Image (tube, rainbow, N blue to C red):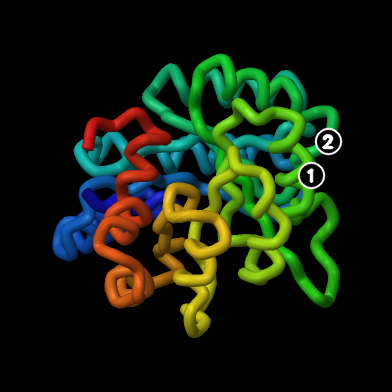
Amino acid sequence: MIIDFHAHVHDDGTGQWADAVAEEARRVGIDYVVEYECVTHGREQAELVTDCNERCRFAYERHPDIYIPFVYTHPNLGEFAMDEVKKGFDWGCRGIKFEVASVITDKCVEPFIEFAIERDVPIVQHTWHKITGNLPFETDAWHCAELGRRYPELKLVVAHISGDNRWGIRAIRDVPSLYTDCSGSIADFGHIEYCVEQLGADRLLWGTDIRGADYLYTLAKVRDSYLSDEDKAKVLGLNAARLLGIEA
């Protein structure tokens, strides 16, 4: 089983990109694509949040056999943000996506953490560590580590291995409840193997960041690595299936 745990279709309303991503996923043997739309435009963008979720729903309803939708929200938007999450789960969402709007340790995020724990669904948090300084309200892997210690029962995915792979790995290594995905970064020599060595194969998810990445290239990061076949199977899909409650 192969599951892309980090994808953005960014359809323009015509269906061309929803169709193209689904077709390419099927062509290379991907079983499911976890899809969420998101934008990095600051904190007061309710209309953009709604637009993103409508685009996600459009792709999902066009190809429900392959897309697994996650609802996107900005926790700082309060009641609207929670209503958006609840609406998303009403039409089929299976998880929650946070981007750059609230640092995940902010007080306003707590109701969403509790919602995810109660529903037993994963949260994917965009994380990045920049030597030039993070954006305002941009979560770093250390924030996720702090939250993971506070809520060990939460299914939290630290996206992109925090951008800087070794930084992100060090940050979350001692918080066993946290997962990470290998999306959105180049294939630094040995970094997939290093991640599994430091975190264990059960905590790494394969993700692409498509449409900003190529499926064959990102598959090769894992398929052509020096991991064992058992560990490759975990990273490419079995770990994601466990998080999503899919029978593999």
Pick the quarter of the image with the C terminus.
top left
Q: Amino acid at mark 2?
A: Asp
Other residues around mark 1 within 10 Å, as few (<14) / some (14–19) / many (≥20): many
Inspect this view and state whether residue 42 appears: yes
- Of 157 and 238, the residue lying toward us: 238
State the SS at label 2.
loop
Q: Secondary structure at mark 1?
A: loop
Residue 241: percent from the left, percent from the top? 33, 39
Q: Position of residue 218 (x, y in %)?
A: 37, 71
Q: Residue 197 location in percent, x, y? A: 51, 64
**Could you say which is closer to the camera, residue 205 or residue 113?**
205
Q: Residue at x 72, y 50 (%)?
A: 100
Local crowd at mark 2 within 10 Å, few (<14), some, or many (≥20)?
some
Residue 158 disc label: none
> Where is residue 73 shown, x and y percent of the image?
63, 35
Q: Left of 81 or right of it: where is 96?
A: left
Above or below, 127 against 151 in this view is below
Q: Is residue 116 left or right of residue 33?
A: right
Q: In 3D space, how far apart are the residues under numbered discs 1 and 2 (Cα atoms)? A: 5 Å
Instruction: Provide the residue designation for mark 1.
Output: 103
Q: Is residue 108 above or below residue 145?
A: above
**Residue 84 falls in image quadrant:** top right
Count the numbered circles shown.
2
Q: Left or right: where does residue 113 sit relative to residue 33?
A: right
Residue 22: image quadrant is bottom left
From this viewpoint, is residue 57 visible?
A: no
Residue sitting at x 65%, y 54%: 173
- Do the residues under discs 1 and 2 have CB atoms within 8 angstroms? yes
Instruction: Provide the residue designation for mark 2.
Output: 106
When the figure is inspected, residue 173 is found, relative to residue 109, above or below; the finding is below
Q: Residue at x 75, y 55 (%)?
A: 140
Query: Tag 1: residue type?
Result: Val
